[in-house]
Image (cartoon, rainbow, N blue to C red):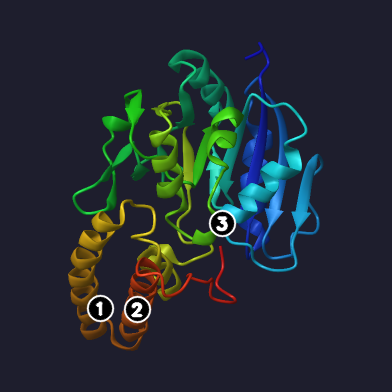
Amino acid sequence: MSESPSAAIIVVHFGDPAPTLACLSSIVADPSIVNRTVVVADNSGNFRVPPSGVTVIPYAGNLGFGAAVNRGVTYLEDHPFDFYVVLNNDIQVRPGFLQAAANAFRSSGPKTAIAAGPLYCDPGLDQIWYAGGGINFLTGTVRQSKSSKDAHIGRFVGFVPGAAFAIRPSAWNDVGGFDPAYFLYSEDVDLCLRLRQRGWRFAFEPEMQAIHTLGQATGSQVLSPTYLYYMTRNRLRPFQPTAYRVYLAILHSCYVLTRAAFVALRNGQYGRAQARALLSGHSQALAHLFGKTRPQPVEGVPR
C-alpha cells in the first residue's frame, strides 16, 4: 500500500436524497490522507444532483443492496485501488475513518479481507450499534457487541455488518462480491462466511468510527414489515450444508410462530402486518430450502 493510499467508495442510495448527501459530505470532510473516488449506486433513480467529484450510477429499478454494490465495484474495477469502502446511505463517517482503514490493512497482514470499526447511533457516541461481532452457529444468528469497552479494542472478529466496511479488492474478487439473490439483509452474513471459508480475516479497528442512522430506508428501527420480511426470508440461506439448514429451519419455525403471535396480539393492526411479514418471509425461506422456489424481491420495497 502506498504512502497515500487510494480508496473507491460505493454508497448505495434509496429514497430520500438527504441522508445520502449527508453521507457524501462526511466522506468529503474526512481529513484522511487517502485519495478517494466516490460513486453512488442509485436504486431510486432520483439522485440527480451529486456533489462535485461524485459519480452517480443510475438504474431504472431497485437492484437491492448487494447487487447495487456489485455494480459500483464493476464500474470502478478498471482502476487500481488499495481498498474499497462500502457504505449504506444512512452512514456518516467520522474524521479519520479512511486513514484508519488504510492503517488497519497495513498492520493486520495480507490475509485481512475486511476492516471495520464501531458504529454509533448518535453523533454524541453514546449509543453503540456495533462494536465487533460474530456468528452464533448454534442458532444461525449474528451477535453484535454493544459494549463501550469492546469499541476501543482492536482485534479480529467473526462478522462485519454491510453498513460500513472496507475490503481488499483481492478478497472481493476471490469470492465474487455480494450474492445479489439476497436483495436485502443477510448478504453480509453470506459474504463473511464465504470469505472465512477461503481463509480471510476481519479486523476491527476502533478508529474507523461512523454514525449509523437506523431505518432511513427500510424502517428497521421500528421493526417494519419490510425489515421483518427480508430478515426472515434470508435467515437460513447463508448456511451449509443442507442438513444444518434443516436444523435451523426447525429452530426458526418455532421462533417465528411465537414472535408472529406475540406481535399480532401486542401491536394491533401494525402487529398483524408484522406477523404477516414474518410468516411470509419464513415460508419463502422454507420453500427455498426445499428447492421449490427462488426467493424474489418484493416490488417497491426499498434498500
The residue type indicated by label 1 comes to Ala
Residue 124 visible? The answer is no
Residue tagged by mark 2? Answer: 274
Instruction: State the residue lying farthest toward the top.
Output: 3
The mark that comes first in sequence, 1 or 2, is 1
The residue type indicated by label 2 comes to Gln
The mark that comes first in sequence, 3 or 2, is 3
Residue 260: assigned label: 1
The residue type indicated by label 3 comes to Pro
Q: Secondary structure at mark 1?
A: helix
Q: Are marks 3 and 2 in contact (CB under 8 Å)?
A: no
Picture residue at 69% right of the left edge, 53% below the top: 41
Cα–Cα span, label 3 and label 2:
25 Å
Picture residue at 20% right of the left edge, 67% below the top: 250
Q: Around disc 2, counting alpha carbons within 10 Å, would you say few (fewer than 14), some (14 to 19), or many (20 or more)? A: many
In terms of image quadrants, where is residue 193?
A: top left
Residue tagged by mark 3? Answer: 180
Image quarter where the C terminus lies is bottom right
Q: Are marks 1 and 2 in contact (CB under 8 Å)?
A: yes
Q: Secondary structure at mark 3?
A: helix
Cα–Cα span, label 1 and label 2:
7 Å
Residue 84 or 89: which is nearer the viewer?
Answer: 84
Q: Secondary structure at mark 2?
A: helix
Q: Around disc 3, counting alpha carbons within 10 Å, would you say few (fewer than 14), some (14 to 19), or many (20 or more)? A: some
In terms of image quadrants, where is residue 196?
A: top left
Picture residue at 47% right of the left edge, 52% below the top: 187
Image quarter where the N terminus lies is top right
The mark that comes first in sequence, 1 or 3, is 3
Q: Position of residue 137 (x, y in %)?
A: 23, 47
Q: Position of residue 245 (x, y in %)?
A: 28, 58
Residue 152 or 272: which is nearer the viewer?
Answer: 272
Picture residue at 64% right of the left edge, 37% below the top: 27
